[in-house]
Image (cartoon, rainbow, N blue to C red):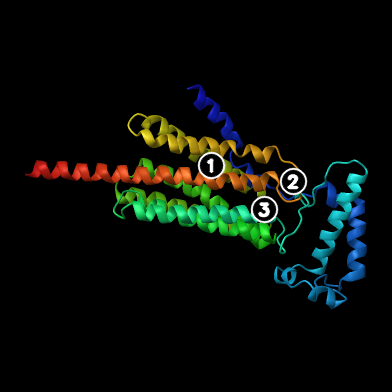
């Protein structure tokens, strides 16, 4: 029981990823940065801040233009590095800007490592979904539920890649809300796994309530200023409920279904990996920060979870066939 108590304590760290609140930070609050940004925009940008006074500067960088980097954005990027250098010259710690570390752009992407590792997660889910569809028969219990879960995850990782490429209000909204859709989908699958033998009315009603809740969640965050506090609370409650539910189910099924160790291990490791978000640090080579490394860690863990899903679906189908055979023999 000790290890389960340890896991329960670790779960308070669950979903730290979703706590990324965008506050003013030491870098962008500094007078050095503000003066740099002010004079850069006055000297180089039109009144709107979108275009350059000298359009040749804009035309020389088509990738940045494609990703909608404005003159004001370019000034902010340049001043970010000037400010970081000024901090280091004074032996101060590396500052953050608008809640983010300074990152070197690559092909116009703000956080290239997080983009790359988000794509890695997408590819892992896609590959494992193909394996799931090859190995699990369509008439297996939970087949449709897990397939829907996979598509939800694929969609979420697409928007994660977009958000880390360019941080706009709309990409932030879609990243945060669809990231929550993965948390809610895991909770939904946990409950559905426990009630899969109940009537279709019960299962359908629960699924409908989850969809309705997500629509309400998305709508609320889409209106007015993004409510980071509410989003954080929703993720904590849903995520902890789902993780604790899976751990309880694994504990109860550990003797009957030996393969549940895969699910338990996944939950423990996935939760523990969120420690990276607490022990944040300036990006290595101005590219690899704790958050991007967290994205890297989650990709291989996905393989373990899908291995559990596949084995569980096969077992459920075998049990279903055995029950049907037993009923047939009774009728004879």
Q: Quadrant of residue 331?
A: top left
Q: Residues within 10 Å of mark 3 (few under 14, many from 20)?
A: many
Residue 144, numbered label: none
Element assignment for label 2:
loop
Q: Residue at x 68, y 43 (%)?
A: 290
Which is more N-terminal, label 2 or label 3? 3
Residue 156 place in picture, x, y as percent? 55, 56
The reply to whether discs 1 and 3 touch (Cβ–Cβ < 8 Å) is: no
Which is more N-terminal, label 2 or label 1? 1
Which is more N-terminal, label 3 or label 1? 3
Nearest to viewer (mark 1 / mark 2)? 2
Label 2 belongs to which residue? 284
Q: Residues within 10 Å of mark 2 (few under 14, many from 20)?
A: few
Q: Residue at x 52, y 52 (%)?
A: 181
Residue 133 place in picture, x, y as percent? 37, 55
Q: Residue at x 31, y 48 (%)?
A: 141
Q: Quadrant of residue 134?
A: bottom left
Label 3 belongs to which residue? 113
Element assignment for label 1:
helix
38 horizontally vs 138: left or right? right
In the displayed structure, 318 sits above or below 107; it is above
Label 1 belongs to which residue? 239
Residue 329 place in picture, x, y as percent? 10, 42
- Label 1 to label 2: alpha-carbon separation: 30 Å
């Amino acid at each position: 029981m000790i290890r389960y108590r340890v896991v329960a304590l670790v779960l308070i760290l669950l979903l730290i990823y979703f706590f990324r609140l965008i506050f003013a930070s030491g870098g962008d609050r500094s007078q050095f940065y503000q003066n740099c940004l002010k004079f850069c925009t006055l000297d180089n940008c039109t009144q709107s801040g979108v275009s350059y006074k000298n359009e040749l500067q804009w035309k020389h960088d088509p990738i940045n233009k494609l990703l909608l980097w404005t003159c004001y954005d370019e000034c902010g990027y340049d001043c970010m590095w000037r400010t970081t250098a000024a901090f280091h010259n004074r032996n101060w710690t590396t500052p953050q800007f608008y809640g983010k570390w300074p990152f070197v752009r690559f092909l116009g992407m703000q956080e290239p490592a997080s983009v790359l590792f988000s794509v890695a997660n997408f590819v892992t889910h896609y590959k494992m979904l193909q394996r799931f569809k090859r190995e699990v028969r369509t008439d297996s219990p939970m087949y449709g539920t897990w397939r829907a879960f996979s598509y939800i995850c694929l969609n979420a990782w697409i928007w994660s890649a977009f958000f880390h490429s360019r941080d706009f209000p709309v990409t932030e909204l879609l990243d945060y809300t669809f990231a929550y859709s993965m948390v809610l989908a895991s909770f939904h699958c946990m409950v559905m796994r426990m009630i899969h033998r109940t009537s279709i009315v019960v299962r359908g009603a629960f699924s409908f309530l989850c969809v309705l809740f997500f629509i309400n969640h998305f709508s609320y965050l889409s209106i007015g200023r993004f409510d980071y506090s509410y989003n954080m609370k929703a993720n904590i409650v849903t995520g902890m409920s789902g993780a604790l539910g899976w751990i309880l189910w694994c504990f109860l099924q550990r003797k009957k279904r030996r393969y549940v160790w895969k699910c338990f291990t996944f939950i423990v490791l996935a939760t523990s990996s969120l420690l990276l978000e607490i022990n944040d640090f300036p990006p290595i080579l101005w590219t690899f920060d704790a958050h991007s490394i967290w994205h890297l860690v989650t990709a291989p863990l996905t393989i373990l979870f899908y291995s559990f899903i596949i084995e569980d679906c096969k077992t459920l189908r075998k049990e279903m066939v055995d029950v049907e055979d037993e009923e047939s023999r009774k009728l004879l």
